[in-house]
Image (cartoon, rainbow, N blue to C red):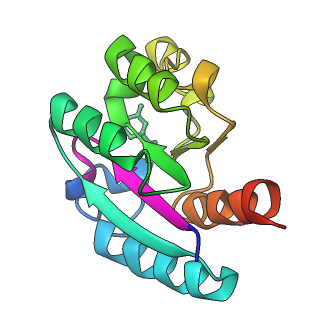
Amino acid sequence: MPSVLILNGPNLNLLGTRQPEVYGKTTLADINALCEAAAQRLGLTIVFEQSNHEGILIDLIHAAKGTHGAIILNAGALTHTSIALMDAIASVELPVVEVHLSNIHAREEFRHTSYIAPVALGQICGFGAKGYEMALDALSENIFKS
Ligand code: DQA
């Protein structure tokens, strides 16, 4: 069964209480449950992780090579700053779907730049927690369909 690493970056552990007017009231545990249900429907295995530390996220991306067939990444604010995360993704050569709960292109100018986008298969943003399920659907259709 194909396996997908779902990786969440800084401050996403606070979902549910963090700026609910921007990110909604869905918690990260709710998103994990939603992803589990979608993965079952699609015949995929998922591993769901969150870290507030750039280096840990990089280590998890490195470890994904040979373990997972793809990555779904919400890198939080590191999306807009981290060349190191971009390099990690380019190094492992795994398909990555970039996800954001909010529409980063409709927000402050500094959120319009993504260092993940140039090395991602695609980007989904603005659809809240549903974006993670959309990313699993996209991987199932584009990467894992035989
Ligand atoms: C986010 C968007 C980022 O700009 C922000 O820093 C986050 C969350 C999102 O899911 O909408 O932490 O990645």
Viewer-side residue, 54 vs 12: 54
78 is higher (above) or lower (below) than 36: above
Quadrant for the N terminus, please.
bottom right
Q: Residue at x 58, y 69 (%)?
A: 2
Locate the C terminus by quadrant.
bottom right
Is 18 positioned to the left or the right of 86 in the image? left
Q: Is residue 107 above or below residue 131?
A: above
- Residue 97 forms part of the magenta stretch: no
Residue situated in front as seen by the camera: 23 or 73: 73
Q: Is residue 40 above or below residue 25?
A: below
* Chief secondary structure of the magenta portion: strand
Q: Residue 92, percent across and down?
A: 47, 32
Position of 20 compared to 65: left or right?
left
Residue 50: where, in percent of width, then height?
A: 25, 54
On the question of residue 101 being in view, the answer is no
Quarter of the image holding residue 127? bottom right
Name above or below for residue 116 compared with residue 48: above
**Residue 108 horizontal/vertical position (percent):** 48, 19
- Residue beneath the point at 33% across and 26% down: 78
Extent of the magenta region: 3-12
Is residue 50 visible to the viewer in this orientation of the structure? Answer: yes
Q: Residue at x 56, y 55 (%)?
A: 69
Please tell me which residue is depicted at 31% across the width and 45% down the height of the picture.
Answer: 63
Left/right placement of residue 52 relative to residue 24 reads left
What is the number of callouts on the image? Answer: 0
Q: Position of residue 142 (x, y in %)?
A: 80, 54
Give the side of residue 78 with respect to residue 102, left or right: left
- Ligand 1 visible in quadrant: top left
